[in-house]
């Protein structure tokens, strides 16, 4: 790869790490010597890149630093297109429109040859007969983002109905169903609710007392799932 491509890839790799990463790890990822890696970092720092650290301690990209004009590999473009098409078929209408809009914004700043790759991608998403909800998932997603309690009426698999006050913190998208992950005040535990069985949804102005990230981490541990790095 060219030097400019290598420098851009170095910035992209640094974005993946929240904590300082050693120069040896970065050099191995790029397939260059440690001396070349140090020169590349010094060059990026001289150009104003927000890279902090030094040899022996590791490096981290300062939050908020903007990457240079967008450049994507063919694999990255196909991943963007496939992800957008998947969301368009399996998410709610507003999220599907957002996926299309995001892809259009990316296309607007790509060079012509890469822009053509967006339309020419041959990776397709098959049709799916997903269950239909009686609620607006956009309202539920907003409650998750703002960490607000919601009142729901839920019908279980055996037809029993119940009213719950829950703390929504995650929404899972599966092939045929979508599942709300929440802390249930009635059960005083984590619960999973199929969104097609939620018959009514009423957001409240009450913010739940714990942070969404903390709930998600605790839920992952309870399920035996790896926590995010």
Image (spheres, rainbow, N blue to C red):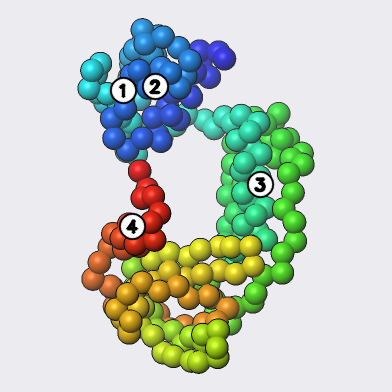
Camera-nearest label, 4 or 2: 4
**Which residue has dot 2 on it?**
26
Q: Residue at x 66, y 47 (%)?
A: 82
Query: Up-down: is 160 above or below 195?
Result: below
Camera-nearest label, 3 or 1: 1
Q: Residues within 10 Å of mark 3 (few under 14, many from 20)?
A: some
Between discs 1 and 4, the one toward the N terminus:
1
**Label 2's element?**
helix
**Label 3's element?**
helix
In the visual, does 115 lie left or right of 180?
right
**Label 4's element?**
helix
Between discs 3 and 4, the one toward the N terminus:
3
Q: Residue 22 shows which numbered tag? A: 1
Q: Percent from the top left, x then y, of residue 32?
A: 45, 12
Q: Residue 82 shows which numbered tag? A: 3
Q: Are marks 3 and 4 in contact (CB under 8 Å)?
A: no
Q: Percent from the top left, x then y, of residue 5?
A: 53, 19
Image quadrant in which the C terminus is located: top left
Q: For this rendering, which residue is in front, 11 or 70?
A: 11
Q: Percent from the top left, x then y, of residue 91?
A: 60, 63
Between discs 3 and 1, the one toward the N terminus:
1
Q: Are marks 2 and 1 in contact (CB under 8 Å)?
A: yes
Q: Does any portion of residue 120 appear in the rendered image? A: yes
**Which residue has dot 4 on it?**
221
Among the 4 quarters of the image, the one containing residue 56? top left
Q: Residue at x 55, y 13 (%)?
A: 2
Q: Residues within 10 Å of mark 1 (few under 14, many from 20)?
A: some
Q: Residue at x 43, y 29 (%)?
A: 13
Among the 4 quarters of the image, the one containing residue 34? top left
Q: Residue 56 shows which numbered tag? A: none
Q: Are marks 3 and 1 in contact (CB under 8 Å)?
A: no
Image quadrant in which the N terminus is located: top right
């Amino acid at each position: 790869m060219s030097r400019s491509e290598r420098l851009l890839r170095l910035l992209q790799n640094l974005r993946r790490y929240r904590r300082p990463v050693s120069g040896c790890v970065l050099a191995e990822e790029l397939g260059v010597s440690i001396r070349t890696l140090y020169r590349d970092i010094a060059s990026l720092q001289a150009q104003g890149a927000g890279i902090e650290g030094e040899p022996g301690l590791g490096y981290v990209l300062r939050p908020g630093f903007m990457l240079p004009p967008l450049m994507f590999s063919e694999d990255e473009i196909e991943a963007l297109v496939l992800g957008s098409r998947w969301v368009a078929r399996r998410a709610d209408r507003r999220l599907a429109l957002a996926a299309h809009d995001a892809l259009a914004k990316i296309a607007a700043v790509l060079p012509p040859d890469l822009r053509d790759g967006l339309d020419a991608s041959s990776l397709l998403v098959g049709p799916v007969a997903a269950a239909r909800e009686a609620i607006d998932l956009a309202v539920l997603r907003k409650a998750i983002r703002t960490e607000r309690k919601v009142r729901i009426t839920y019908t279980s698999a055996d037809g029993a109905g119940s009213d719950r006050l829950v703390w929504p913190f995650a929404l899972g998208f599966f092939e045929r169903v979508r599942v709300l992950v929440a802390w249930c005040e009635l059960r005083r535990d984590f619960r999973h609710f199929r969104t097609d069985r939620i018959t009514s949804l009423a957001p409240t102005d009450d913010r739940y007392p714990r942070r969404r990230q903390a709930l998600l981490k605790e839920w992952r541990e309870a399920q035996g799932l790896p926590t995010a790095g």
